[in-house]
Amino acid sequence: MSKFELTKTRFREGVWQGLLTPLAKDAGRPEIAVTLHDRPLHGVTVTEVPGGGRWALEVPVPLDAVGDGVQTFLIADANADTVLDSFTLIAGEVLGDDIRAEMELLRAELDMLKRAFRRHCLETM
């Protein structure tokens, strides 16, 4: 079990950012490992936030990870061998099918809600 909790703060300009909060007083400096397709990612930085005992995490997305398909980044506590969080990039043709399926599901749910609302209005009159 990890001695840290990771909260995403933002993902902007190709850099995923998060905040590591210690769960124990003796947590020490976090050792973070980020992987993409089971390969370690380089350029990850962990910087102590002044006056709080928390740590800022920055994960730069490499250019070769941007392209067609699904890319999942795993962020793990290297000392506890526990996954703290993950994020996924989806691009290209894969994204088109996913968005169309999601839109169909949203339309079906909206139709169901409209029917239930109309039924409710008829029953309360």
Image (spheres, rainbow, N blue to C red):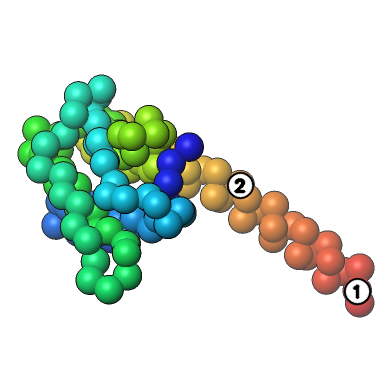
Q: Residue 43 carries which label?
A: none
- Above-or-below relation of 107 to 50: above
Q: Can residue 30 be seen in this view?
A: yes
Task: Kindly identify the residue that appears in the image at 11 percent across and 37 percent down.
Answer: 42
Give residue 113's position: percent from left, percent from top.
69, 58
In screen coordinates, is 34 left or right of 122?
Answer: left
Element type at mark 1? helix
Task: Give the labeled residue for mark 2.
Answer: 108
Disc 2 secondary structure class: helix
Q: Distance between the residues labelled 2 and 1?
A: 25 Å
Residue beneath disc 1: 124
- Foreground of the two, 100 or 122: 100
Q: Which residue lies furthest to the front in this view?
A: 26
- In terms of image quadrants, where is residue 72? top left
**Contact (Cβ within 8 Å) of mark 2 with mark 1:** no
Three-letter residue code for mark 1: Thr
Residue 66 x, y percent position in the rendering: 15, 38
Nearer to the camera, 54 or 87: 54
Residue drawn at (46%, 54%) of the image:
23
Residue at far bottom of view? 125
Residue 11 appears in the figure: no
Q: Nearer the viewer, residue 121 or 31?
A: 31
Point 39% across, 34% down: residue? 80
Q: Which amino acid does label 2 sit on?
A: Ala
